[in-house]
Image: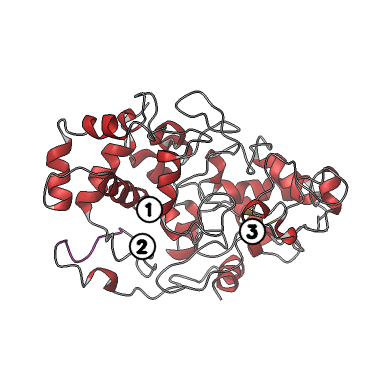
Amino acid sequence: MLTKLMGLVARYRLVRALFVFLSLWLFACQPKVVPSYDWNLPAGFPAPLVPINNPMTQAKVLLGEQLFFDQGLSFNNSLACASCHQPEFAFAEPKKAAVGATGQMLRRNTQTLVNVAYNSNLTWAHSGLRDIEQQILIPMFAEDPIELGITGHEQDVLQRFQQIPYPALFMTAFGDSDISFERIVQALASYVRSLISFNSPFDRYAYFAEDDALSASAIRGMDLFFSEKFECFHCHGGLNFTQSSQHENQRLDLRPFHNTGLYGVDGSGAYPPEDQGLFEVTLNANDMGRFRAPSLRNVAVSAPYMHDGSLDDLAQVIEFYANGGRGAGVHSPFKSPFIKGFELSEDEKSDLLAFLRSLTDEEFLSSTYTQYK
């Protein structure tokens, strides 16, 4: 099991490759596109799963990148995807919640897009959203809350992309210059899937035998992270530091949603009515307050934390888990059994923070698209 292997990394520091790289067979039956895409993955790392009807090509990635940073994708030319998913913050943003094109505040914190290609579930709390193409429709067309606000303005928005450089980009990506929302979604999904980050100090230490890539403090923090005392790896384990992961070598969907004891407003474990997590989708009482465990890659730059942005920094997050939750949520009957609380010294807290910061991939943060400011 991958999490157990990761635990061995923490103890023995001898793991150099955990996965077998398979050929990208998903693309072999697509005669109109390049038969494979260079993910630029470290040797031995598995490729993400990709829908057969939207195979990865560099041309689609480049088109999607242009669209991602273009405010013309919003109905009033005021908002781009990158307005909320900002590269310097690991494609998240330093706000408790995002704000849409009309100024309407959304109810949840903007999630990072780092390695989103590996996510088995998308958004904070929806078990039915598994394809990026499907999820992208929400910010584009949803009316409550309004994000990009395209609904009712479809022709106006499409007309904007008839201008240079888009006809040529669509021609290269799709073989003709026909511009449609279907193709816009496919290009955006391709770009988002290309946001791969596997070059943090932790990666260099764990997978590439660079023994000096981590400080002594970060190594101690890594041991704590993968320990049964702290339990962190149970929800944030594996290749992408989240259970909500799938790739070509792992198609089994592990348990991705958890109640962490953040709230317990009525003394029986309920979350605030404005956001009750997965329960809103399933109407299963056991799903009250369950949210997807996000990836911890580049977590040090993606504050604030939790689905509502209610924890300001990583020190607060560690204290939250050490306490076994917050307020009445500590005693919630819906809380994950892994959120038990633990005793934590100041030195251990410092070491754990050092490890979490070692998951920052500076090359990834500095090499992404720089047009948006």
Report which residue position mark 1 lands on. 133
Q: Is residue 164 visible?
A: yes
**Residue 55 horizontal/vertical position (percent):** 27, 61
Residue under the point 75% across and 59% down:
285
Circle number at residue 282: 3
Residue under the point 45% across and 44% down:
138
| Disc 2 secondary structure class | loop
Q: Earlier in the sequence, mark 1 or mark 2?
A: 2
What crowding class fits label 2: few (fewer than 14 Cα within 10 Å), some (14-19), or many (20 or more)? some
**Residue 216 horizontal/vertical position (percent):** 61, 53
Residue under the point 49% across and 44% down:
112
Circle number at residue 343: none
Mark 1 or 2, closer to the camera: 1
- Going by the numbered disc 3, the residue's amino acid type is Thr
Q: Is residue 230 above or below residue 31?
A: above
Q: Is residue 347 visible?
A: no
Cα distance, mark 1 to mark 2?
A: 26 Å
Q: Is residue 324 above or below residue 154?
A: below
Circle number at residue 42: 2
The quarter of the picture where residue 91 lies is top left
The residue stretch that appears in magenta = 32-39
Q: Is residue 102 toward the left or the right of residue 41 in the image?
A: right
Q: Earlier in the sequence, mark 1 or mark 3?
A: 1
